[in-house]
Image: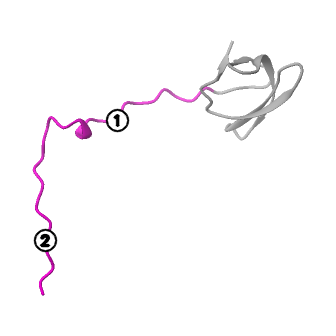
Amino acid sequence: MKPERAASRRFLSESPFNKEPVAQPPAEQYAVHDRVTHDRYGLGRVILVEDDNSVIVDFGSRRVWIQTPCAKLTKV
């Protein structure tokens, strides 16, 4: 038996799947003592930066470890 060959596919230049990916803005970098705001916890201050991919933020009543980039965390 011969294996079946897949039919060759046409190239459709108008296809939405052929578009180039949209460039993402660079991830925001945080430093110790940066003022930040979080959608859930409110206003806080960065107290520790771990390997540029997570931060520990002091929100007054609690300290929270947050992985970055985080859409809910923004610099003030």
Q: Amino acid at mark 1?
A: Pro
As drawn, the label of residue 21 is: 1
Residue indicated by mark 2: 5
For the residue pair 48 and 10, the one nearer the viewer reads as: 10
Dot 1 falls on a residue whose secondary structure is loop
Residue stretch rendered in magenta on the structure: 1-28
Foreground mark, 2 or 1? 2
Give the main secondary structure, helix, strand or loop, of the magenta stretch: loop
Say whether disc 2 or disc 1 marks the residue closer to the N-terminus.
2
Q: Are marks 2 and 1 in contact (CB under 8 Å)?
A: no
Dot 2 falls on a residue whose secondary structure is loop
Can you name the residue that lies furthest to the top here?
76
Q: Residue at x 23, y 35 (%)?
A: 16
Q: Is residue 3 magenta?
A: yes
Q: Is residue 43 magenta?
A: no
For the residue pair 59 and 45, the one nearer the viewer reads as: 59
Say which quadrant the N terminus sits in: bottom left
